[in-house]
Structure formats: C-alpha cells, structure tokens
Image (cartoon, grey):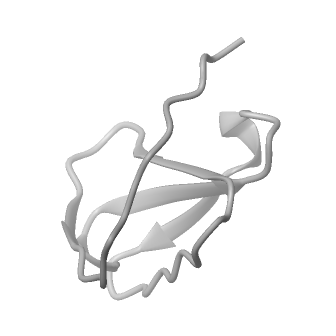
Amino acid sequence: MTVISGTWWVGTGTDYDMAKTAPMKAGSFIKHTAGGIRFDCAKDEEVVLQIVGMGPASSIAVPIK
C-alpha cells in the first residue's frame, strides 16, 4: 500500500490495541506479507491509499474485545 494523503495507522499481532498502532504518513509504503495478523485504519482524518497486490487474498474478521 502507498499512503497518498493523510495518516494510515498500522498495528500487528493478536492484541487489537489502537494505542499500539504506528502512523504511516503520506508517502509511506506498507507491505503486508501473507499469513500475518494485522489491523489498520484511519483515525481522525480522511486517508487516500493505493493498494496493489497479487491474489488470491483473503480476510478473516476477528471480534474486537
């Protein structure tokens, strides 16, 4: 992913804690490898991303505690 504008927040691991996410500002590149556990989001501003990948891809929804 490339962050075109805004700040995208990225976290990893099984402990879903938005306080532990890292900010990725405009111009940042993010690579998610297969099989990893991660969560990302926009917090308080609009974010534009360019997402490019090779499939197949899947997502598994995990309940938030």
Residue 49 image-quadrant placement: bottom left
Q: Residue at x 34, y 88 (%)?
A: 27
Q: Residue at x 68, y 54 (%)?
A: 37
**Along the line of sight, which residue is nearer the eye, 48 or 63?**
63
Q: Residue at x 23, y 56 (%)?
A: 47
Q: Give percent across and percent down for residue 55.
A: 30, 76
Extreme residue toward the top, this view: 65
Question: Position of 17 compared to 52: left or right?
Answer: right
Residue 50 image-quadrant placement: bottom left
**Along the line of sight, which residue is nearer the eye, 50 or 58?**
58
Question: Position of 51 compared to 1: left or right?
Answer: left
Q: Quadrant of the N terminus?
A: bottom left
Q: Does 31 sit above or below residue 10?
A: below
Q: Residue at x 67, y 51 (%)?
A: 21
Q: Does 33 sit above or below residue 42?
A: below
Residue 54 image-quadrant placement: bottom left
Q: Give percent across and percent down for residue 38.
A: 63, 54
Q: Does 28 sit above or below residue 47?
A: below
**Along the line of sight, which residue is nearer the eye, 2 or 44?**
2
Q: Give percent across and percent down for residue 65.
A: 72, 11
Extreme residue toward the front, this view: 56
- All told, the count of numbered labels is 0
